[in-house]
Image (cartoon, coloured by chain):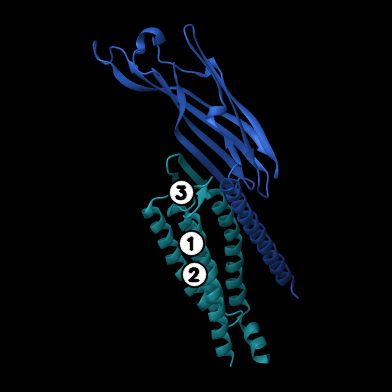
Chain colours: A blue, B cyan
Amino acid sequence: MRASRVFKLVFKIFISLLTLSVTVVSILGGLSAFMILTTPGNIGINPSDADFNFNPSPLNINFTLPFNLTNAGYFDLENLKLEIELAMNYSHVDYPVPGVNETRVLKIFNKTQNFGNIPKGLTGNFNFTGLFSDFHFPPLFNFTTDIDWHRGPPAIIFTANFTISLDYSLGLHSVTIGFVDIPLGGFP
Amino acid sequence: MGAVKNMVRGFIYTSIYVITTIVIPLITFSWLFQLTVEGIPLNFEQQEYQSVIFWVTAFGLVICGCAFFTYSSPKKSIRRAVFALIQILVNCLYIWSYRFSGATDIEFTIVGFGFFSLDISQMVLVFMGIYFFTIVLKVYNIIDFTINREKIREDRMKA
């Protein structure tokens, strides 16, 4: 057999092995992602579990949200991120003109926390923390005078968007799950 | 007798390509679009689904046609090498069609909750890399079969 034939054969085997391994990893990765998503209870995030502290005067607001995720797949789950966006719905006194109170939805919090990897077959338990310093209120916003406390109760309704993103099978699959406009509760 | 054998081989390989490039992807996408997450059914845009199905079927049929001409050609013939190269180039377009039809970044709506999206564009790029190696091999075949044409003919006559 000529040297070129041997080289061609080796190259062919190399391509076949590469194709086979990537195909197997892709199929198993896709199956894993769907096993995680479709099995009820694998994604344990419940807003009612959050320890939410809100005090309008002096203004202090923070929360801790425990959540867990079970990696029921064949590979390690990488780059797990949770993004939480909080909004408050309230009636703004004398806005946009004096004598008119307009209902506004104000984005007050947006933070993404990276929780790293979850090895296959394990459940990761995490805590997402939102500190007072992570909240962003518009300048000159006054909780005591700008909010119509006669509306409701509750005068303020908090809602949240949760976005979980993760990479699977060496980054070949990226999955994002978003829960939008989840009611968290009101104050007072 | 050899011509009949080649035709049969062409049909067999065409059937294999029909299954792998059209039937399996269509079943996978149908299953994907009927999925439930945490017990909640997913919603998707009908137009997006139609687009994915159209491109998968269109390129799948072209690949199947190329596969027939490739595998029904005599072994080590220039015709076979050329069709094999065309087939791999169409295969690249097929894989790339997943990207431009929106199949690599599918976003579903979870009714009353939010959304779910799956991005496999990285996987498509890895497959494109593998196809590059395959194209190199097919080009080598064309050159090899052209240069050694006389020897291949002699071997064929002896057989």
Residue placed at 36% from the left, 54% from the top? B47
Q: How crowded is the residue under tag 1: few (<14 C-alpha within 10 Å), some, or many (20+)? A: many
**In which chain is the residue bearing label 3?**
B
* First in sequence: mark 1 vs mark 2: 2
- In terms of secondary structure, where does tag 1 sit? helix
- Are discs 3 and 2 less than 8 Å apart at CB? no
* First in sequence: mark 1 vs mark 3: 3
Where residue B63 is drawn, which disc sits there? 2
Residue placed at 49% from the left, 6% from the top? A58
Residue type, mark 2 in image: Ile
- Residue B78 seen in this snapshot: no
State how many labels appear: 3
Q: How crowded is the residue under tag 3: few (<14 C-alpha within 10 Å), some, or many (20+)? A: some
Residue placed at 65% from the left, 83% from the top? B151
Residue in front for this viewpoint, B28 or B141: B28
Residue B131 percent location from the top left of the image? 57, 60
Q: How crowded is the residue under tag 2: few (<14 C-alpha within 10 Å), some, or many (20+)? A: many
Residue type, mark 3 in image: Leu
Residue under numbered circle 1: B94
